Image (cartoon, coloured by chain):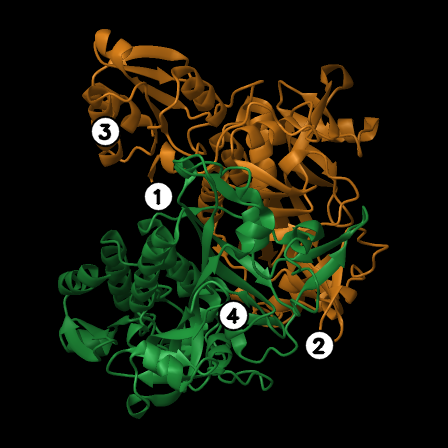
Chain colours: A orange, B green
Amino acid sequence: MSRMRQRHLFTKTRKEAPKEETAKNAKLLIRGGFIHKEMAGAYAYLPLGYRVLQRICTVIRSEMDAIGGHELHLTALQDKRIWEKTGRWSDEVVDNWFKTTLAAGGEVGLATTHEEPLTNLMTEFIHSYKDLPVYVYQFQTKFRNEKRAKSGIMRGREFLMKDLYSFSRSDEEHNEFYERAKQAYHNIFERVGIGAHTFITSASGGSFSPYSHEFQTLTDAGEDTIYLDREKKIAVNDEIYSEEVLADLGLSKENLETVTAVEVGNIFSLGTKFSDAFDLTYVDEDNKKQPVIMGSYGIGPGRLMGAIVEVLGGENEMLWPKEVAPFDLHLLQMSDDDTTYAEAEKVYRALTDAGVEVLWDDRAASAGEKFADADLIGLPYRAVVGTKARDAGGIEFTDRTTDTVRIVSVEELVRLVAENA
Amino acid sequence: MSRMRQRHLFTKTRKEAPKEETAKNAKLLIRGGFIHKEMAGAYAYLPLGYRVLQRICTVIRSEMDAIGGHELHLTALQDKRIWEKTGRWSDEVVDNWFKTTLAAGGEVGLATTHEEPLTNLMTEFIHSYKDLPVYVYQFQTKFRNEKRAKSGIMRGREFLMKDLYSFSRSDEEHNEFYERAKQAYHNIFERVGIGAHTFITSASGGSFSPYSHEFQTLTDAGEDTIYLDREKKIAVNDEIYSEEVLADLGLSKENLETVTAVEVGNIFSLGTKFSDAFDLTYVDEDNKKQPVIMGSYGIGPGRLMGAIVEVLGGENEMLWPKEVAPFDLHLLQMSDDDTTYAEAEKVYRALTDAGVEVLWDDRAASAGEKFADADLIGLPYRAVVGTKARDAGGIEFTDRTTDTVRIVSVEELVRLVAENA
């Protein structure tokens, strides 16, 4: 659905957020009618919020496809036997499992991540060097039995995750893909509007690689402390912060700022940790058996949406970046008289015919309510139709991103918005 | 991704299905590389299978939008307190719950359906007659702790469900929407290719309505017995089969066939059952409080995919209907020589430029293997490029739906396929 009359939108905005919400993202998103708190750490996405989430997924999907990713969809229910192969079934190793019991007998878990089942699956398909490399990804609901959940949609017990996994023949092939994934991640954060606030951050690498990389978005709502070289646009996570690491990364202490941030993505070289556990190997050109080199690449679209709100949201308003806004333009009809209605309808048709996604506030509400609601809903473009604008010579058009206001004709409006939508 | 070189598709077909699979849909889909069995009743969707599933969802979504549905997304994790309001938290009332424990304390369930949380949510937004009607739907993973799971993707412990819920002011308004939903369901089954095999079937209605309606697809793999009047195109479920019901529905025993079928959709008048439990009411034009009238409308896209395979699949082959095929056309390149490769590439480009989704079998494999694989993958159009077709004057084009084979030029091929794709 590429357009909507607001009288058909069942959600309403709220003047106040529920008292128990402490996170800014949850407060603003609940007030705007984007999400509904089902229980601590589990939020439903209402029509406006689901549109934003889907548009974020569309951006991520296009970047994953561009680096050769193929989309699939694994299961949430997990087989104990598969996870025992790496020892990660144990609650002492992975401390946030949800586990439950099958009526038919036996325990099952709800996936916190998918390295084990995917590596196991790949043993069926990867045998020869000709079968590699393979890059697959999914958008999948993950379940994590977190003790605390107080960051709104930035840390949930149930949340959507895009996870990509790479299967390569050699470290060289892996590293080359790792760099492409890194660039794809930069593109994603740029496109969803928080590129300038998001920095690649070296973090601990595990046994197979000196570092992994996180993408950290600066916000006081974050749970991480990082040390940022703003000029070089790179940072170090406090887990690995040391003289040695700084020297290794070519950073000097005096150029670093200590900042608070939220991790919105991470990329990780897994080496042969999982392929060894599942005996995932291939036969090379010389007929020799070799282990498959793996990597994993995660982004939580819901957390990303939360981070966008933390960075770009105000006290009583939101401003969605153009690629992820639920609609492109908010059309505010200022009164109910026939002339204004006809004008609003004409604008609505002209814009939607030109491919612009429009939310038309056709409700019987006061101008004050309409502006307050439009601020909370946060679309990047706004067009006001009514007596005042008509007296001034047309439609009052605001590009909220640049905060420019102009009086324009329908034709100008279509041209200005369709160009950028 | 609208096109793919088959050498990049990591899945391979299999000559044999795993021995433990008994359902035809699971056998064929595993052999074709569409799905992977994670555990009994839980299947992963591999790239080809996920494309089919998504295309089925696209058909359903367009029909739901067309009757005024707004998409949202509720949570899988469920709050015990909400379900206790209708008594459906109890395992004696709902016998297929998965329940688990929060690390922070307390029980949670995994949603088997969503009437309770959605009705509860709506109490926040529905207050006045002006707020109604509301139609919302979602595509959501449901979890059901089934004792047995042996019908492949037709009955899972974890499966995707499209569920739409209607909230209306009166029985009249409800009934009017119910009829529109019925028509939308007919459209869906027609579009996904099993309309001729699918019949609306009266079933038990609960306390608020004499009947509910199921959509039953005829197949021996079904678990239901229905009594079908083939001429009138309506059936009766065996749960309510009686002289009285037949008379009420205007059916005569002698015109009924006893057939086996699988329920691929159902629509249900809920009356005020849930709105009473959650006190979901509205104030009418006369300032009187009235209960909201509800309905629910379900289709499992995975089950539908399984039913399509049961109906249209053969022993060693599948034929996907055009609206749900993972790609429109299978391009088979019969040899590796430069001329054939160049010709295949030319065809690939011409078709994809015209908006046709093409799977190009560019692998080094025998003609026999390629045809056997193409049969299993089951795309509706096929184009063969190689010496034999070239000698005959061009490209061998097969419309598998009508089983017609012709030798055509690239331009003719594009015209023939793009017209119908």
The residue tagged 3 is A345
Q: CA distance from mark 2 to mark 1?
A: 42 Å
Q: Which one is closest to the eye, mark 3 or mark 4? A: 3
The residue tagged 1 is A1
Q: Answer with the quarter of the image where residue B242 lies.
A: bottom left
Compared across the picture, whether B261 is left or right of A178 comes to left
Compared across the picture, whether A40 is left or right of B125 comes to right
- Nearest the eye: B123 or A37: B123
The residue tagged 4 is B35
Callouts 3 and 4 in the same chain: no
Q: CA distance from mark 2 to mark 3?
A: 58 Å
Q: Which chain's residue wears label 3?
A: A
**What amino acid does circle 2 point to?**
Ala
Callouts 1 and 3 in the same chain: yes
**What amino acid does circle 1 point to?**
Met
Looking at the image, which residue is at 43% across and 71% down? B264
- Nearest the eye: B42 or B352: B42
Q: Earlier in the sequence, mark 2 or mark 3?
A: 2
Q: CA distance from mark 4 to mark 1?
A: 30 Å
Q: CA distance from mark 1 to mark 3?
A: 17 Å
Label 2 with label 4: CB-CB less than 8 Å: no
Callouts 2 and 1 in the same chain: yes
